[in-house]
């Protein structure tokens, strides 16, 4: 939500020193006016703790934005009035409540529509929109890794991989990306005989060497913030020939240390071109129907302009801390 960018020079300097970025109110779809903007929120306790940081609340108050908790024990239509409803809860009942509220209150900006959120909870469907993009390649090419969905029968994975022509090593991720601890599990498979140890439903992606650095691109309305994070290290041909088995990794893109202030090869550390990110973000906002999400991107090692989107997350964890939004 762009909170008013028309800051005084003093405010602007203070916020830069604190690592804060402000946004204009019109960016997420509601109009700026003289009245206070009321944001009703319905979040899990974990999300409230990570998102509603004191700095964010203080900055919001200074810009005339109030965060008000939605009482889940009362009908949503009886609460408010809200200018924005910000939510990250799951379940059919809640989705029905939000959808009903959207229909009855079209003047309220709901972040984001439940059906759009569900679309990126599936790792197969989330990347289909990226694969279908036809962006001009003057600033670089964007694609997705070759992938295969396995829904059942671990014993058939090796055969399916051979049939699909996937090359080792392979990254294995749960098919469902619902924010749970399990959905963030990540495995790297070095040989086909070990593939049967994996547990479907899952997505297999060809591993692409990328210098051990990924780019997390945070998208809030029309505003974009990109940060570097350490990722899985490259796998050489020699290492691949000598390795076997399936190895489990932690939640790489979230748990890994920042790669912002580390001495890294410039060809690896260089951020994707801004025009490319702006075009990609605009296309995904339109196709996904989301205004609060992030994408994980990598650049293939040895290239200057070949990028891959490997994950998309709605209302990502620690968005305030990671993107300083």
Image: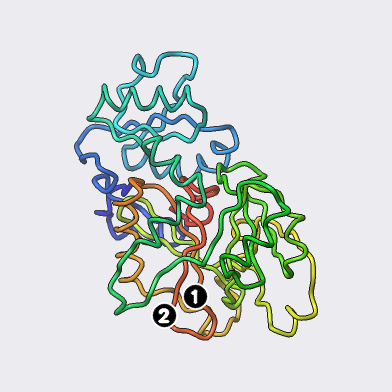
Q: Nearer the viewer, residue 153 or 316?
A: 153
Instruction: Report x, y in % for residue 185.
Output: 67, 52
Instruction: Report x, y in % for residue 171.
Output: 64, 63
In the displayed structure, would residue 311 be above or below residue 259? above
Q: Dot 1, how many residues are within 10 Å of its Cα: few (below 14), some (14-19), or many (20+)? A: many
Q: Residue at x 50, y 61 (%)?
A: 296
Q: Is residue 236 left or right of residue 299?
A: right
Sequence order check: which comes first, mark 1 or mark 2? 1
Q: Secondary structure at mark 2?
A: loop
Q: Residue at x 60, y 81 (%)?
A: 263
Q: Secondary structure at mark 1?
A: strand
- Kindly report the distance in space between the C-alpha atoms of the residues bearing marks 1 and 2: 7 Å
Instruction: Report x, y in % for residue 107.
Output: 22, 30
Colouring:
rainbow
Q: Residue at x 35, y 27 (%)?
A: 99
In the displayed structure, would residue 238 be above or below residue 184? below
Q: Is residue 119 left or right of residue 12?
A: right
Residue located beneath label 1 in the image:
299
Q: Residue at x 59, y 78 (%)?
A: 211
Instruction: Report x, y in % for residue 303.
Output: 48, 84
In the displayed structure, would residue 29 be above or below residue 161? above
Residue located beneath label 2 in the image:
305
Q: Where, by quadrant of the figure, is residue 196 drawn? A: bottom right
In the displayed structure, would residue 236 be above or below residue 199? below
């Amino acid at each position: 939500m762009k909170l008013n960018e028309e800051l005084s020079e003093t405010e602007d300097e203070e916020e830069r020193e604190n690592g804060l970025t402000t946004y204009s109110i019109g960016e997420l779809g509601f109009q700026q006016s003289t009245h206070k903007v009321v944001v009703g929120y319905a979040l899990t306790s974990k999300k409230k703790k990570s998102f509603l940081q004191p700095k964010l609340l203080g900055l919001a108050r200074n810009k005339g934005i109030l965060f008000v908790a939605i009482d889940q024990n009362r009908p949503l239509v009886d609460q408010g009035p809200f200018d924005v409803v910000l939510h990250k809860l799951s379940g059919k009942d809640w989705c029905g409540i939000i959808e009903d509220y959207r229909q009855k209150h079209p003047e309220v900006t709901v972040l984001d529509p439940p059906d759009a959120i569900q679309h990126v909870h599936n790792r197969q469907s989330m990347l289909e929109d990226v694969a279908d993009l036809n962006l001009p390649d003057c600033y670089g090419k964007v694609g997705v890794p070759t992938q295969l969905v396995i829904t059942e029968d671990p014993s058939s994975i090796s055969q399916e991989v051979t049939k699909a022509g996937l090359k080792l090593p392979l990254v294995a991720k749960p098919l469902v990306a619902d924010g749970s601890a399990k959905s963030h599990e990540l495995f790297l498979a070095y040989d086909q005989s070990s593939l049967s140890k994996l547990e479907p439903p899952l997505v297999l992606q060809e591993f692409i060497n990328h210098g051990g650095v990924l780019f997390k691109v945070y998208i809030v309305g029309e505003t974009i913030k990109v940060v570097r994070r350490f990722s899985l290290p490259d796998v050489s041909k020699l290492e691949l020939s000598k390795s076997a088995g399936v190895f489990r990794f932690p939640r790489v893109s979230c748990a890994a240390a920042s790669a912002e202030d580390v001495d890294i090869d410039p060809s690896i550390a260089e951020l994707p071109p801004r025009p490319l990110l702006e075009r990609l973000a605009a296309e995904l906002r339109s196709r996904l129907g989301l205004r609060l999400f992030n994408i994980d991107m990598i650049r293939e090692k040895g290239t200057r302009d070949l990028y891959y989107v490997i994950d998309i997350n709605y209302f990502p964890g620690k968005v305030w801390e990671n993107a300083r939004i």
